[in-house]
Amino acid sequence: MVDIMASRPYKRRKLVETKPAPPAQVQVQFQSAEGELVGPELDMSSATTAPQLQLLLNKLLDSEENYSIYLGPVEVKEDLQTALSQTSTTAESLLRLTYHPMSLFRVAAVSRATSNLEGHTESILAVQFSHDGKKLATGAGDATARIWDLDTETPQFTLNGHKNWVLVVSWAPDSKTLATAGMDAVILLWDPETGKAKGSRKGLRGHSKWVSSLAWEPFHSNPECNRLISASKDHSVRVWDIRTCTCVAILNGHQAAVTRVIWGGLGLAYTASQDRLVKVWHCSDFRPVRDLKGHAHWVNQLACSTDFALRTGCYDPLTPQPELLADQRLAAQAKFDKALGHTERLVSCSDDFTLFLWTPATSTQPVARMTGHQQQVTAVAFSPDGHFVISASFDKSLRLWDGFNGNFISTLRSHVGEVYQVSWSPDGRMLVSGSKDSTLKVWGMRAKKVVKDLPGHADQVYAVDWSPDGLKVASGGRDRILNIWRS
């Protein structure tokens, strides 16, 4: 039988070229992170690139700063059309483009441990760099604190005086005093230049149970750096004058252990407690202002949107000699004002698996309740510019949130153990986390993934800090080793 179809001559099909659709016209308007509109509504092509948006924004703001630009939760990295495809927004609606100032300097990811320093004979529980990144202090379960020489990466001073675990080390804003506290309920003050005790050798005494947190009055509020707040398991918060070594106020009101205290830059102090409350106090007379209610279990940690500005004061990595400034207090005030925006924001995290975002100076109602973690949330921190919030949990994950509205952005997964601590790089482009799995991980915020895995510890990592100059990360934990990491 003859195959009729096979006998037919083959006719080549004509290929029809499909032309890409022309870029759509969209209407956009710029706004600050706090919702302030900038310039008029503008008609432009969806093919407009990120650099072109940057130039246009600089014209509108009469500025030469660099900005990151977001469409909703998505950063515009290439062009508007690419960002649109990653959101549920349509080209027919008005596109609100939110801009955030970017750091003028860029921090390199740490990648290697330049030192593995021995000295502590029990677990390292606290690690903190001074405001300029030139000094490093640690506290440990061996009842000692240590100051380390970062030029030679060797022990400089061993600070003896505590009778039990040192849980907290805290540098004064001018880095001229180090305060240490812990399980023995005593606060000791040290001169970092000599390693000798300052003031009374008996220290600041008054708490009846261990001291869980310390906070100094901000530099722009008090350049003398002589006032300190302490929080304790005895349910109280105390204010100290370190010149006279006396308690000048006792803040009572919590019904359980106070876990964290922050001395804000607006003349307010914030305390968190296992009684499920966050309290706001006025620092002129230390009277209670308001209670922030919402958590159903212990409040573990607080973070403030101005934390980085308050920590570094007048120090700036681009001008690393603040002593040359004509007025250090005004420089610190200008840095705080830039970080402040409309008001200070506060975020709290809890054993109830949630976080709350607050504007504590103005309201008792939360801006947002942030859910998603599956176990206790142990640590929380604002990025240096206040744009993001990072939270760490016993569920082995970190979560990234919008620091203005509390919206969830991304889950960061790679740890195989509980995550204990997080610390941001000073440019806000990266953060480092320490975990029960004995590793540190450096995360890139642009890609939302691990950029460096740092497996240098032999046991759980309890404490980690990124230096304010961006050059170093310090970590310590159960293996009693202090690791210093550099790029």
Image (tube, rainbow, N blue to C red):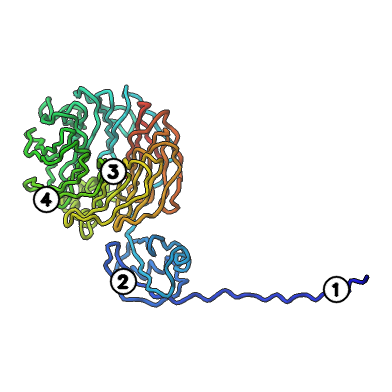
Residue drawn 23% across the image and 53% down it: 358
Measured Cα–Cα span from mark 2 to mark 1:
69 Å
Residue underneath mark 3: 350
Query: Mark 4 and mark 1 in contact (Cβ < 8 Å)?
Result: no
State the mark number for residue 60.
Answer: 2
Q: What residue type is disc 3 on?
A: Ser
Vertical order, 324 against 194 (above or below): below
Provide residue 152's location: percent of width, then percent of height.
34, 31
Residue 487 visible in the current orientation:
no
Residue underneath mark 4: 289
Q: Secondary structure at mark 4?
A: strand
Q: What residue type is disc 2 on?
A: Leu
Which mark sits nearer the N-terminus, 2 or 4? 2
Q: Nearer the viewer, residue 237 or 47?
A: 237
Residue drawn 34% across the image and 42% down it: 422
Query: Mark 3 and mark 4 in contact (Cβ < 8 Å)?
Result: no
Q: Where does the C terminus fall, quadrant-wise?
A: top left
Measured Cα–Cα span from mark 1 to mark 3:
75 Å
How packed mark 3 is, by other alpha carbons closer than 10 Å (few <14, some 14-19, many 20 or more), is many
Q: Residue furthest right?
A: 1
Measured Cα–Cα span from mark 4 to mark 3:
22 Å
Query: Mark 4 and mark 2 in contact (Cβ < 8 Å)?
Result: no
Q: Is residue 80 left or right of residue 127?
A: right
Q: Secondary structure at mark 3?
A: strand
